[in-house]
Image: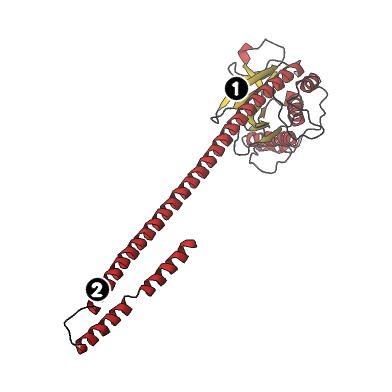
Amino acid sequence: MKKVAILMKSSEIDIYNETEFRSWVKNINVALTENNFCSMIEEHNREMDNRKDITKKEYLKDLPSGVRWRMEGKITPCLDGRKTIVMSIDTSEKIRIKAYKFMNAFINCISKIGGNVYVDKMEDYDNTMATLLESRYKCKLYEKQVKLRNRIKTDNRKMSPLYELEYNGDFCFEVFAEDKNKKWESLMAIEIHNSGVGESKLADLFWRLRDDAISKKTIIEQERAKQEEARKKQIKQWEEDEIREERIRMEREELIKKEKIQEKIKNHMDNWEYINNISMYINDLRTVSGVSDDERKLILNYCEYVEKLYSKSDFFKEILEFSQKLET
């Protein structure tokens, strides 16, 4: 198994180190858990007492005034009639401390391997969430209930309808894992009977959590690597496209520039040919015969004017300026 470099607190167990994890998980001991529970459990305990008082107050409303007056003094006043959202622990008062010890051990163990437990305040039920590596889990702890008719007859049998449910002292801890589609699937359910504490089952649960979290972490990292590779390929493609577009743009500009130069040179050639034709025309006029002196004088003036108008020196100047621009 490939070990991934992660930042851990000095007190944390390296979840990727199988030897270290095995040594730690063997020493999980629910019975040694102190009664000084975490704040989430303490809040649950206060809320259960508060709900018990609310239920009693509702019950007293239907009693005769004299009985109600005597019993009201035995009820601890509650702050209000509203329910506070607390973690998913549903047990009888008789085994509540035992359930708290188990849940407290679970929370401490999750923290020990770098995870976290919190209460999703948006949900009234099934709201105890755990995170480990990059995976999310939902868990609930509840005491099992049976119908009175299924119980063994005892001397303490209550006068209650046989179809009513009653807690039996055994509790169940269920853990659900979130899949890639954000749906919940059962990861593991452990049952702890009245006389047990469940260290071995809790150890099995943490092995299951470890395998599931590492497996999902590996898949997530592989997916990230694929996405990163795809991103790099996309960036490279964008760069190549940009370079190709720039090359095409430069080639197009060079072609346009070349066409303009060729057009300019053609104009020069046409002008040069035209100037030479003008020169031949002027020479022919200057050598014309059969005219008077006054007429020759006028013809020569005309030739001089045309020669200046189509001066080769101006043409050469234009050629030189054009050549200088080519060098730049």
Above or below, 286 against 40 in this view is below
Q: Residues within 10 Å of mark 1 (few under 14, many from 20)?
A: few
Q: Which mark is residue 186?
A: 1
Instruction: Where is residue 201? Give x, y as percent.
Output: 72, 17
Instruction: Where is residue 3? Give x, y as percent.
Output: 72, 26
Left or right: residue 148 versus residue 276 is: right
Residue farthest top in this picture: 152
Question: Which residue is pictured at 54% across the width and 35% down the height?
Answer: 230
- Return the residue nearer the eye: 26 or 253: 253
The residue where tag 2 is placed is: 281
Above or below, 70 against 274 in this view is above
Q: What element does badge 1 sit on? A: strand
Q: Are marks 2 and 1 in contact (CB under 8 Å)?
A: no
Residue farthest bottom in this picture: 294
Please indicate, yes or no, whether residue 29 appears anywhere in the rendered image: no
Q: Earlier in the sequence, mark 2 or mark 1?
A: 1
Q: Amino acid at mark 2?
A: Tyr
Which of pointers 2 and 1 indicates the residue nearer the eye?
2
Instruction: Where is residue 300? Give x, y as percent.
Output: 26, 83
Q: Amino acid at mark 1?
A: Ser
Q: Residues within 10 Å of mark 2 (few under 14, many from 20)?
A: some
Instruction: Where is residue 280? Give x, y as percent.
Output: 26, 71
| CA distance for labels 2 and 1 | 107 Å
Looking at the figure, which quarter contains the N terminus? top right
Quadrant position of residue 156: top right
- Return the residue nearer the eye: 77 or 25: 25
Please indicate, yes or no, whether residue 241 appears anywhere in the rendered image: yes
